[in-house]
Image (tube, grey):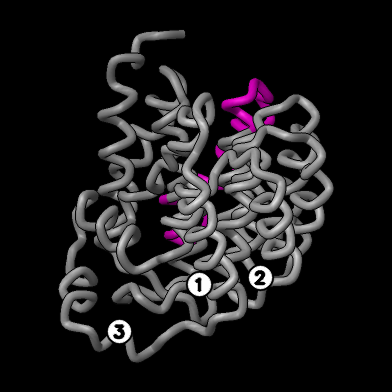
Amino acid sequence: MRTALLALLLAGPAFAADKPLSGNLVVDQALLLQLDPLVVRAPRVRAQKEMIDPRINQHLLRLLKQRMDARPDSAAQLDASIGNLNKLSTRTGYDLKTRYTELGFLLTEGLAGTTDFTLQSELENAARLGKNVQTRAAALVALAYTKDLRFLPLFQNALLDPNITVRFAALESLLVLGDPAVQFQIGNAARTDASFAIQIYGAAGMWRMGDAYGREILLRLYQHTDWFVRAMAIHYLGELGGGEEYRRLQRELAAETDPAVQAELAAALLKLDPKKDLP
């Protein structure tokens, strides 16, 4: 799911932590390379050419209402199956862990792109008023897959939310919309959000949408004093850059002392290697 892997890392208690971020935040080094979240397949977007069984919608609606105000279930972390999932650190392991410990992901995938007015209304209500931040995030992204610009004010307001998970989902929603009308909001988040994670994710989104200033933001942050900021910026430079980025990052490899950032540098250089001779 592209809903804020990093927001899950910053906000979710389910992940083992072994390295401090700024402040009290922690992150598992084994997940550092897994910056690309799961992809929402939005199956109903393809299925809506045919009538969807109303029982499916009713079931998803019931789950959404149940989760709107649910508190995180700390007892669930004692479940042996979830405990086993939490020990997985490969990409496939992370995907499984997210899918089966975050109901919000499954709700997002099941509801994404719905054209049903009742479901859209409930999603909007959950996004505005839900007390469970993961459900609010899921509702925002699910609405984004409708590609309906009438939800743009909702996403814009969510970008101002004090909770990073909600803000990350709002940014993700704007990127899913993909309309030129959202470029200003994405750029503003990349320039001004209090979270470096959101700044970097927004900058990568800007660059993908053709705004070269996103590249400049990443180039400003890939030498940041915080190891996590460096690693995340390097990841997207590796994904989106070319020969110039290859040469910059190659120079960093010998000087970098943090092993997690070294690993991210190596991965980025491997991705950029086919482009290293480009001007």
- Residue at label 1? 11
* Residue kind at label 3, given as amino acid type: Gln
Q: Nearer the viewer, residue 44 or 103?
A: 44
Q: Is residue 211 magenta?
A: yes
Q: Quadrant of residue 27?
A: bottom left
Q: Nearer the viewer, residue 71 or 94?
A: 71
Q: Is residue 195 magenta?
A: no
30 to 87, vertically: above or below:
above
Describe residue 223's horizontal placement relative to residue 183 as left or right. Answer: left
Q: Are the residues at dot 1 and dot 2 in contact (C-beta closer than 8 Å)?
A: yes
Describe residue 152's horizontal placement relative to residue 165 as left or right. Answer: right
| First-in-chain label (3 vs 1) | 1
Q: Which labelled disc corresponds to residue 77?
A: 3
Label 3 neighbour load within 10 Å: few <14, some 14-19, many 20+? some
Q: CA distance from mark 3 to mark 1?
A: 15 Å
Tell me the magenta residue range: 206-231
* Residue kind at label 2, given as amino acid type: Asn
Q: Which residue shows up at 72% across the image and 27% down it?
A: 179
Describe residue 118's horizontal placement relative to residue 87 as left or right. Answer: right
Q: Main secondary structure of the magenta part?
A: helix
Q: CA distance from mark 3 to mark 2?
A: 23 Å
- Residue at label 2? 163
